[in-house]
Amino acid sequence: MNNPIRKIMVYIDGTEQSVTAAQYAVCLASFSGAELIALYVINTRAVEDLLKARIFLRDEQVEYEHDMEADAERYLNYVNELAMKKGVSIVKKRSRGSVNKEIVNAVNEDQVDLLVIGELSRIRSRRDEFYDEAERAMRIVTCSVLIVKDEDRVWEMYESLA
Amino acid sequence: MALIDMVVEKIVKIPLESKDKPDVLRELVRILKDADEIDDFDTVLKAVQEREDKQSTGLEKSFAVPHAKTAAVSSLKLAIGIAPQGIDFDSLDKEPSKLFFLLLAPPGQSGPHVEALAEIAKLAHSNAFCKALIRSDNAREVVELMKGE
């Protein structure tokens, strides 16, 4: 049987949980030999919604989109360093729009076998307003999804990787 | 951290005691200081006031979302204040504001900041939910409502 996981995509959003997910994905790619893609989505949809709701001013929209571009660059570079330290190559990918839709599109375009995401909120509110973009993506992507938990254990695993 | 994870009793105050906009901003920042969520009260208050000076974050339907980006915090911080009596906050519809969601974020976490603000904005769309929050008797009830318990 061939390796069932040839392409792994890890979703990075600037949270500690997503960095832990990246460490786990580096370990998985190292063990399996799978290609690793890191995706950061600049959530322009939310910024537009905030402008429409008049929570953001026009100059805030510009400022935050600029900040998110810079964050994307910084976090993707950081994850790239994490991978390079362990001899794993990584494809950095970024897109703009609605997070869950962009994740789904990227999974389809790149024919990803496994999506890796960070730990979700342990609180599951019954209120529809509190949805998590990664959680929504998890529900609708066509590939298998791995949710990474236990930051300390993952860090130890990553550190022990030759 | 998801917005819902930040909703705990110590960052909720009902009723707010303030009578005007400058005082309510101070009272919201004070909630975070008293909850040991921030150290530098003055820097945080200045950041919130500066954003408010550009344009009021008082929206429609009694909702206000003061927010700021400041290096005085290292992660997202939320405070919820409820004033059933209403406070003049220079809102869009000129009506008194009753529900206040203060959100602070450090530079470098613009993505989670934007997503948390978007979640708060969605809450404002539900009239029934906003009314239920305003009618809450205490912080515990607010937390239960937010978490849908």
Image (cartoon, helix red, strand yellow):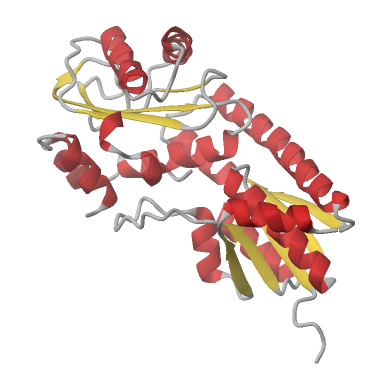
Residue located 71% across and 75% down the image: A113
Picture quarter with the C terminus of chain A:
bottom right
The percent coordinates of residue B68 (x first, y second) are 48, 21
Is residue B28 left or right of B87 when viewed as pictured?
A: right
Instruction: Confirm whether residue A22 shows in the render.
Output: no
Q: Quadrant of the N terminus of chain A?
A: bottom right
Give the left or right position of residue B84, taking residue A20 as reference.
left
Which residue is at 52% across, 37% downward? B114
Residue farthest to the bottom, as pictured: A1
Using the image, determine if residue A5 lies above or below residue B137.
below
Number of labelled discs? 0
Horizontally, residue A26 falls left or right of residue B96, namely right
Is A70 rendered above or below residue A134? Answer: above
Q: Is residue A141 visible?
A: yes
- In the image, A8 versus A88, the foreground residue is A88
Which of the 4 quarters of the picture holds residue A110? bottom right
Side of A151 where A132 appears, left or right: left
Nearest to the observer: residue B26 or residue A49: B26
- Displayed quadrant of residue B34: top left
Return the residue nearer the eye: B5 or B57: B5
Q: Is residue A27 above or below residue B23?
A: below
